[in-house]
Image (cartoon, rainbow, N blue to C red):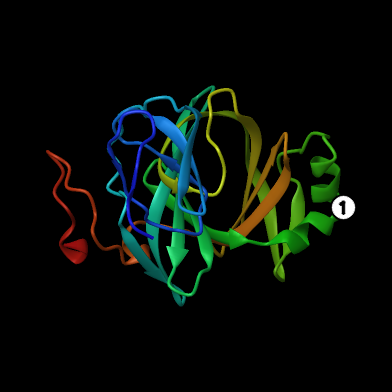
């Protein structure tokens, strides 16, 4: 698919992943829905707040047999701060999320089987989740360590869903001492679960990182 044009401002609208239906115009923040080569403006996305993430659109990661490229980002805010969720696509079509907060990263892929676990099913039905709740996913026991009510602060790049202002969700992160991770997210459209690992930046073997003024990239990542 060739690059498209923003229907609001006429700027070039890069197509990084033709399989994804939504793009955010980098110039006017219009949220665009793509379908069969046509584009439609469906709203305006909030301007992303500045941050100092070394990740950017086009960054690559490689870990545990996963090799994928960042094609989009959602920024989430909650009462005590905010974090990034980067959407990645592998060459074989697999989708991943890379959560980023306070210098740590959670690389996950969708794991719907855990939605049948009683504690997760109860949460999906609209009930609260208790911190320290323990569930088994992928043969691993994980404990709920963080529960947040979050709001979408904006987006960039290509994404599988619309990111209009007013979108909220409840996010529960699980982890264990071995570094396994599970993220469960509930919003008005339902509940999804994503299983993977926690990692520092070096453990992701990243490429094409963003250059940040005043930050010296570690030699191992250069």
Query: Quadrant of the image for the N terminus?
Result: bottom left
What's the residue at 51%, 69% (across, down)? 93
Image position of 107 with respect to 156: above or below: below
**Does residue 75 appear to the left or right of 150 in the view shown?**
left
**x%, y% of residue 48?**
37, 29
Q: Residues within 10 Å of mark 1 (few under 14, many from 20)?
A: few
User: 11 or 162: nearer the eye?
Assistant: 11
**x%, y% of residue 104?**
41, 49
**Does residue 95 appear to the left or right of 3 in the view shown?**
right
Occupied quadrant, residue 11: top left
Does residue 33 appear anywhere in the picture?
A: yes
What's the residue at 26%, 63% (across, down)? 207
**x%, y% of residue 126?**
82, 35
User: 129 or 14: nearer the eye?
Assistant: 14
**x%, y% of residue 114?**
76, 59
What's the residue at 76%, 56% (across, down)? 135
What's the residue at 43%, 43% (across, down)? 23
Residue under pointer 1: 118
């Amino acid at each position: 698919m060739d690059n498209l044009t923003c229907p609001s401002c006429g700027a070039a609208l890069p197509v990084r992943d033709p399989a994804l239906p939504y793009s955010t115009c980098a110039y006017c923040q219009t949220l665009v829905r793509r379908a069969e080569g046509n584009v439609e403006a469906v709203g305006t996305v909030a301007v992303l707040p500045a941050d100092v993430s070394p990740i950017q659109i086009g960054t690559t990661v490689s870990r545990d047999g996963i090799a994928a490229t960042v094609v989009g980002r959602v920024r989430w805010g909650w009462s005590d701060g905010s974090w990034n969720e980067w959407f990645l696509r592998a060459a074989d079509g697999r989708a991943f999320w890379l959560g980023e907060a306070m210098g740590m990263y959670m690389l996950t892929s969708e794991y719907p089987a855990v939605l049948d676990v009683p504690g997760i099913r109860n949460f999906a039905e609209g009930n609260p989740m208790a911190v320290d709740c323990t569930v088994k996913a992928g043969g691993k026991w994980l404990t709920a360590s963080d529960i947040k009510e979050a709001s979408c602060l904006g987006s960039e790049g290509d994404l599988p869903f619309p990111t209009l202002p007013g979108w909220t969700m409840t996010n529960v992160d699980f982890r264990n001492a071995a570094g396994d991770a599970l993220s469960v997210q509930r919003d008005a459209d339902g509940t999804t679960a994503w299983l993977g690992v926690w990692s520092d930046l070096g453990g992701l073997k990243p490429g094409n990182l963003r250059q940040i003024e005043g930050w010296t990239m570690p030699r191992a990542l250069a």
